[in-house]
Image (spheres, rainbow, N blue to C red):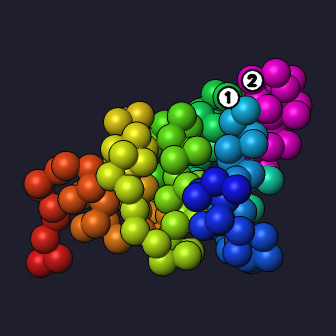
Amino acid sequence: MSADMEVFEGLTNVEDRLLRGLLLAKDYWRRSAVADRKERMVMVHELHTYEMFSLNQLAKICRVSVPTVCRKLTKNATGGRFQPEALSALVYIRKLVILQERLPTAIVRTAVSSGTSVSTVARLTGASETTLYIKAGNTNVRSAA
């Protein structure tokens, strides 16, 4: 058994809304590449119920145009710079946050280098924004003032 599997072994019965939403988004990102328009809109509606992603982010994840999503749904989440390619890294970070494990610098940099902002990573994973800025190599940490 790999070290990653041992770390995540305790997550089989975890009921975590953020983790479920990220896992679903990751699955829909993969499936939307071959889904028809109707199936993709069903995915958009289901992800929208998690109230984690902005309308623009939902459109990116499910590969639907932003105007189409805006016509069908109302805003229910904060946005931010986000690229669906970061979803695997976000799932990994969320699992580590749940287990209160140390975040590897490489996985944080992977998420941020894909084009997702540090503040969006923090909001979607529950990780400390300051920790993420340090791990990502950004020295411009926003002050609380």
The quarter holding residue 102 reads bottom left
**Residue 33, magenta (yes or no):** yes
Q: Is residue 56 visible?
A: no
Please tell me which residue is depicted at 50% across the width and 41% down the height of the picture. Answer: 86
Q: Are marks 1 and 2 in contact (CB under 8 Å)?
A: yes
**Residue 53, magenta (yes or no):** no
Which part of the image, by quadrant, shows the N terminus?
bottom right
Mark number displayed over residue 112? none
Circle 2 residues within 10 Å: few <14, some 14–19, many ≥20: few
Which part of the image, by quadrant, shows the C terminus?
bottom left
> Compared to 28, does 50 lie above or below?
below
Which is nearer the N-term, disc 1 or disc 2?
2
Residue mark closest to the camera, 1 vs 2: 2
What is the secondary structure assignment of the residue under circle 1? loop
**Please, which residue is most extreme toward the front here?**
1
Instruction: Considering the whole magenta stretch, tell me its main secondary structure.
Output: helix
Q: Position of residue 97 (x, y in %)?
A: 50, 71
Say left or right for 4 vs 121: right
For the residues labelled 1 and 2, the Cα–Cα distance comes to: 7 Å
Please tell me which residue is depicted at 59% across the width and 34% down the height of the picture. Answer: 60
What is the secondary structure assignment of the residue under circle 2? loop
Say left or right for 35 vs 99: right
Say left or right for 137 vs 27: left
Query: What residue would you read off at disc 2?
Result: 33
Q: Position of residue 90 (x, y in %)?
A: 52, 52
**Which residues make up the magenta segment?**
31-45
Q: Position of residue 61 (x, y in %)?
A: 64, 38
Please tell me which residue is depicted at 46% across the width and 52% down the height of the picture. Answer: 79
Query: What residue would you read off at disc 1?
Result: 63
Circle 1 residues within 10 Å: few <14, some 14–19, many ≥20: many
Amino acid type of the residue that numbered disc 2 sits on in the rendered structure: Ala
